[in-house]
Amino acid sequence: MSDAARRNEEKVVTSLMLAVLIVTAIALMREGPQYDNVLESTRFFTLALFSGAVIGFIGWMQTFRVAPKLSLAPPHRQPWIAALTLGLVFAIACSWFNRTFSTPTNRSFTAEIDSLTTTRHERWHLTVKLSDGTYARYLITPDAAARLKGATAARIGIARGALGFDYVATFEPPARF
């Protein structure tokens, strides 16, 4: 294969990988608000992203027999794009898996409602003031938002995520005695 044909092939592969990266980033924007409901969301996202990135980088190098090099020159940028893409895919998949296969627990806490707002696409966000004085924002369903309208506090139920990260699963007004 001539040098011109190889460079053209590298450009095509890189362009396709960048297109997949953009689509994956858009998918993460759709899944991203779900990270608000994970209690240790920063640690969870970081672990998922870096695990996927490492697997993507090593997988690309092993599959195509490319030696690792800290360079963004055309033949060496593809493993980095693959690493970033697979890192984003892992972040999306781990969030979905943790939430979908969570196990309800009997744990819950009550917090003072600071605000209940809606955004585009009928996404509702509940901002609460926690007992330590900090604020937390959660993504809630329209049904939960309807139940919490007019309430001053919310009872927040915790579920055990499938990957071990606790997930805020239910929102309801506190029981009145």
Image (tube, helix red, strand yellow):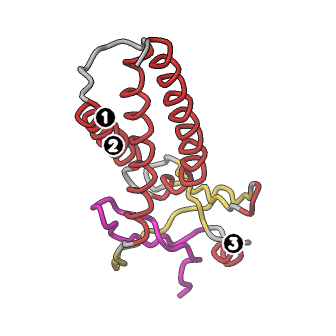
What is the quadrant of residue 114 in the picture?
bottom right
Q: Looking at the image, is mark 2 or mark 1 nearer the viewer?
A: 1
Q: Which amino acid does label 1 sit on?
A: Trp
From what the image shows, is residue 63 above or below residue 141? above
Tell me, for residue 52, which label it has, or none: 2
Q: Looking at the image, is mark 2 or mark 3 nearer the viewer?
A: 2
Residue at screen point 38% across, 49% down = 90
Q: Looking at the image, is mark 1 or mark 3 nearer the viewer?
A: 1
Tell me, for residue 142, which label it has, or none: 3
Q: What element carries label 3?
A: helix
Position in image of residue 66 (x %, y %): 27, 24
Q: Is mark 1 on a helix, strand or loop?
A: helix
Q: How far apart are marks 2 and 3 (CA)?
A: 32 Å
Extreme residue in the right direction: 120
Lower position in the chain sequence, tag 2 or tag 1: 2
- Mark 1 and mark 2 in contact (Cβ < 8 Å)? no
Closer to the camera, 3 or 56? 3
Residue 2 on the magenta segment: no
Closer to the camera, 147 or 85? 85
Closer to the camera, 64 or 117? 64
- The residue carrying mark 1 is 60
Q: Give the range drawn in magenta.
A: 153-177
Q: In this view, does 119 lie to the left or right of 67?
A: right
Closer to the camera, 19 or 5? 5
Tell me, for residue 151, which label it has, or none: none
Position in image of residue 143 (x %, y %): 67, 77
- Mark 3 and mark 2 in contact (Cβ < 8 Å)? no
